Image (cartoon, coloured by chain):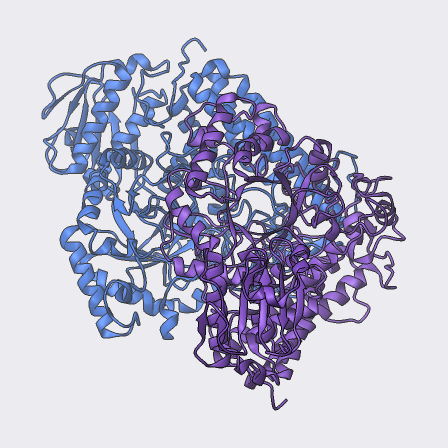
Chain colours: A blue, B purple
Amino acid sequence: MSSSVVYHPGDGYLAWQQYRRTPSSNVDQYAGYSHIVAAEPNDAVMGSAVGELSRGLAGMTGKQVSISRIAVNAPCIILGILGTGTAVDEVFSEGVSGTLKAEGYVIRTDSNTANIAIGAVTSAGMLYGVFHLLRIMGTGGSVEHLNIAENPVNQLRMINQWDNMDGSVERGYAGQSIFYEDNRITSNLERIEDYARLLASSGINAIAINNVNVHRVESRLITAFLPDVAKLAAVFRAYAIKLFLSINYASTIEIGGLPTADPLDSAVREWWSAAASEIYSVIPDFGGFLIKADSENRPGPFTYGRDHADGANMLAEALKPHGGIVIWRCFVYNCKQDWRDRTTDRARAAYDHFKQLDGRFMDNVILQVKNGPIDFQVREPVSPLLGAMPQTNQVIEFQIAQEYTGQQRHVCYLVPQWKEILNFDTHLKGEGTTVKRIVDGSVHSNPYSGFAAVSNIGNDTNWTGHLLAQANLYGYGRLAWNPELSSEEIAGEWITLTFGTEKSLYQTLLSILMDSWEIYEAYTAPLGVGFMVNPDHHYGPNVDGYEYSMWGTYHFADCHGIGVDRTSATGTGYTSQYAGLNMALYESLESCPDELLLFFHHVPYTHVLHSGKTVIQHIYDTHFEGAERAARLAAAWELVREQVDEQAYRHVADRLAEQAEHAKEWRDRINTYFLRKSGIADQQGRTIYE
Amino acid sequence: MSSSVVYHPGDGYLAWQQYRRTPSSNVDQYAGYSHIVAAEPNDAVMGSAVGELSRGLAGMTGKQVSISRIAVNAPCIILGILGTGTAVDEVFSEGVSGTLKAEGYVIRTDSNTANIAIGAVTSAGMLYGVFHLLRIMGTGGSVEHLNIAENPVNQLRMINQWDNMDGSVERGYAGQSIFYEDNRITSNLERIEDYARLLASSGINAIAINNVNVHRVESRLITAFLPDVAKLAAVFRAYAIKLFLSINYASTIEIGGLPTADPLDSAVREWWSAAASEIYSVIPDFGGFLIKADSENRPGPFTYGRDHADGANMLAEALKPHGGIVIWRCFVYNCKQDWRDRTTDRARAAYDHFKQLDGRFMDNVILQVKNGPIDFQVREPVSPLLGAMPQTNQVIEFQIAQEYTGQQRHVCYLVPQWKEILNFDTHLKGEGTTVKRIVDGSVHSNPYSGFAAVSNIGNDTNWTGHLLAQANLYGYGRLAWNPELSSEEIAGEWITLTFGTEKSLYQTLLSILMDSWEIYEAYTAPLGVGFMVNPDHHYGPNVDGYEYSMWGTYHFADCHGIGVDRTSATGTGYTSQYAGLNMALYESLESCPDELLLFFHHVPYTHVLHSGKTVIQHIYDTHFEGAERAARLAAAWELVREQVDEQAYRHVADRLAEQAEHAKEWRDRINTYFLRKSGIADQQGRTIYE
């Protein structure tokens, strides 16, 4: 413990880029590295790589860093594009560049000179290599014998901002937008650049900068606001991040002056073609369009008797000549359902809408599929649409923003959830057809594939509202780069980079993060049933909050039992959307996993789970335990008070205290609801308000 | 039927002041009255009286109306202040003026000359007399043998506008404010005058022109905005309506620059005294202040360890030298209740807060008490605070705005509800101590007493959103004038004045209005339990909408039963706030009236009502019947399509159709909720969604 060092994240702005004096037994190793060898940067990304390395080394060694074109003294850190005759070519064999993808890199320590060389085939790869080295040093790793070759597993590693130009953030829990205020694009490009640095350092390479719900003003991002969009694109470009825009499907009407948005209308197609040309004339490497159409009252091709493929292809055709792509969201369902209608099942909607369109989309269209069939609940099954369209590009959509998982007032480290989803075996092409192999494109050999996720940041100083929610942003990027990283590894990296290596602090934070999802699930909606939140803002318990609404999210609790029968035998038939083995797994009450039981089956409260408990006793037990465990998080944090600065300590302590209190409200409302409804007492006789 | 005439209310703007060619067999009687005899008006109210009579006669006779100071030809209508040597003194005996209160009047037809004389002791009385005569003619009554003497039963007949200066109306269901827009007072005084005419014609004599929730901007109505307030006061003054302002209790801090609002602080008292003087220098007949303090997060004397009497007396002292009054609302309760806390009962709050303060208030303070202990529900008991403070002035507060009774999208004629409340026997001073005798001041001989009510108007062309909701505004004024008028009489007047005398139309409208409260109650919250509405906006069914909230409005439904035990024996003791006979009535499950059962008792679903039905079957039956009856209202209206103009027909038809549809939603949500919760099937096997 003597060598352990504590970082003081303070207000949290630096996040995992503290670049403080390094806290490890390897600290002496780093001290000598104050010289960088690099060719004159020939693009902005290379400039960022050199700049970031320089900044990082200066911070971690406490020494001034020098930069030269050729190696003048050792040890130094040598950067170079492989095969261009720089010093790195002396370190790496000729064949190594063939093993690298565009964004890959190699890192090697020369055992003689102690020089560290980073090679890549693009400046983007170089930037990622630099961030890798800085991560090693930031976490106190040895740099004596580095021999690393890395490629990203996923091609598209994207962030979706749900920012509105009025400055609000839809489902934002960390203040206002950093991109917009008063219906204008921000002039504070410094904050944007700091965000770009955070994203690039975690591995992100694409961003859509406005909400998928595109209002009148944001419709003009592709026209009147283009000059300002170009400024943002330049900031992200320097960190190898492509900029996308969410567009309004009805732009031809709203801003184009046309009477229609029919995707087969030639005037409409020409308008989009001209709009794309205009965008690319200003932003030559523009990523493309993200679009939510015919969903939750947004316009779309249905109005004209066309389908999603017609709509997406119209846009894809306009972007194709410029290398752009269309990302079309599959979050399509009937949001005006009659609660009395038991035949409609929202869970079926994405699959029912899109599966039949496989093969109809152009090759620069990607479908963006939410991880589950409903909407980012704390627990739901994997969307059966993932992988079910072999001829169609797909990306998976996660939500880093904790809309349904505590809204960054509760701690809920989501990487374990995402891992579970990515490791789910769809059996679509036999055993081992995991979701991660679908979304990395290897199962169906799609030209495009990858990850997208809704950001959790705003203009709060610490970016994410809850300081610990930074772990989700960091973890998302790392997982998108390499889904094989474990939740613990990622959490450990984030903790060490942010707080240092002091062991009790590290262990406490690791426990808090690793337990948090399970705890949150325990005191909220049970057994996969979902929702039970207050309408609209989705915060806090409300068992019947959505029960009689038009949103298609019901639990059907009565005095006998609860759950949604989605079986093929007696229910909505949703189970049939899964491949045979999974269908059988979910269809049968015997084999259905406990944690998803109420998603797939309506059962009596007295039904006995695999755990040996009845459903009702499970509800009581998990809610008492969940609230207790939430309280223990706060207690555990108190024990490391001396190991962290007061500002960060107080911030986290306040949030954990709020969570503990709110967990009791969850516990009591859920328990009271079910005691009143079932009439079945708690076997342990604990306090449930009648 | 041949003599029946149909008015065409069209867009509804003229409301009950159609002044069209009169629709009765007495039409020939009116034709001759085209001459008015009146002294030169010496005040604005007399001018309004003459003007209104002239306008009304011209409209109803179709002839030009002439006016002279002395009688020149007969028949004519002679107006005069009694005992001032005008022509009316020849008609009425000397003693008659002694029988008149300030606002009273006499009307007599001279059997020889056929002249109609209207006498009063004030110009206000004259105005009311004129409106009475116009009402007779507007409803087709005979004027051949008039011999009328009328005094208002209630002294204060007040309207509360819940209008905000941003143009919104709290609990407004008829558009935006007619008083304000963009944080300024309107310059459209014509619409204000038309509103004053409507109010005066129904008998209203006071108005508070801004919301009791006073925001920063409205705090300055008593300072910066005074010149514009004076313009509004002048408009209302001409119709004998006194203007009041809702004030911010913390004005001394918010706009006065003082550090406190302590009511016993001399600087605070001086500030208010100066503020009052300033107001009266601009508006010499200013009515006074309406105030909501220490209620729903509004500031008040509690902050300083003072009580309501301290706060009210501070203001009363400032107003006293000018003849002004303070109207202090008793809507005070803990709005941050923990739903788990079963010892706190919101129903008790007003009585518990105020009863003990009897005798402490200055004689120009009036307490304004909501009609029931909760909040304007479709059914609740009468507030036990009414009449319980013999030494304190009280007015009753009704809500014409249909916040909990269909929000002017459903028809709900409230006069029968108000009548039931007014006729309630409190037994406070023996049998016959009815609420109406308390609020008219006769029981306790209070210097001030009367009615107040929240207005239901906005800038919709027809004033009230739903055309039929005009009947509530009209009926409120008429009832405040004379609580002995029957619901049918008032409805009949309104129908005839608005739609004419065509019998099928009249009967249909009368049935719609008279049945509407019962129908609305039938398909909404049952047996007096209240609420079961969506939070915040309060529209539409949501059984658990307030069940776990901080607002203190619970039903405690579980799988066995429902209701709030407010008995003294086993419950919250609320029943003890009633005089002995009423306490016994409500305390006993045997004697408690069915319609209030769940307000006072928690009972099993199988409890048998006096009606012979179980509670659960009552719920099912009333909800099926209520929805059916709502549908029949729409059907009945269709049958009189030919008897009304297309615009008014369509408007009412659309609202009734919406109501019928929404009543089904109420029916199904309530029935499903209770079927799921109780597990008890409908005896008649009707469709209840499971």
The quarter of the image holding the C terminus of chain A is top right
Quarter-of-image position of residue A496? top left
In front: A238, or A304? Answer: A304
Q: Residue at x 62, y 36 (%)?
A: B336
Asked whether residue A344 is in view, the answer is: no
In front: A612, or B307? Answer: B307
Left or right relative to A588: residue A172:
left
Q: Position of residue B178 (x, y in %)?
A: 43, 56
Q: Is residue B640 above or below residue A202?
A: below
Quarter-of-image position of residue B310? top right
Residue extending farthest bottom: B2
Q: Position of residue A378 (x, y in %)?
A: 54, 44
Asked whether residue B641 is in view, the answer is: yes
Left or right relative to B252: residue B136:
right
In front: B334, or A676? Answer: B334
Residue extending farthest top: A2
In front: A41, or A83? Answer: A41
Left or right relative to A469: residue B649:
right
Q: Position of residue B288 (x, y in %)?
A: 53, 41
Residue extending farthest right: B590
Left or right relative to A687: residue A16:
left
Q: Is residue B281 above or below residue A567?
A: above
Q: Position of residue A105 (x, y in %)?
A: 25, 36
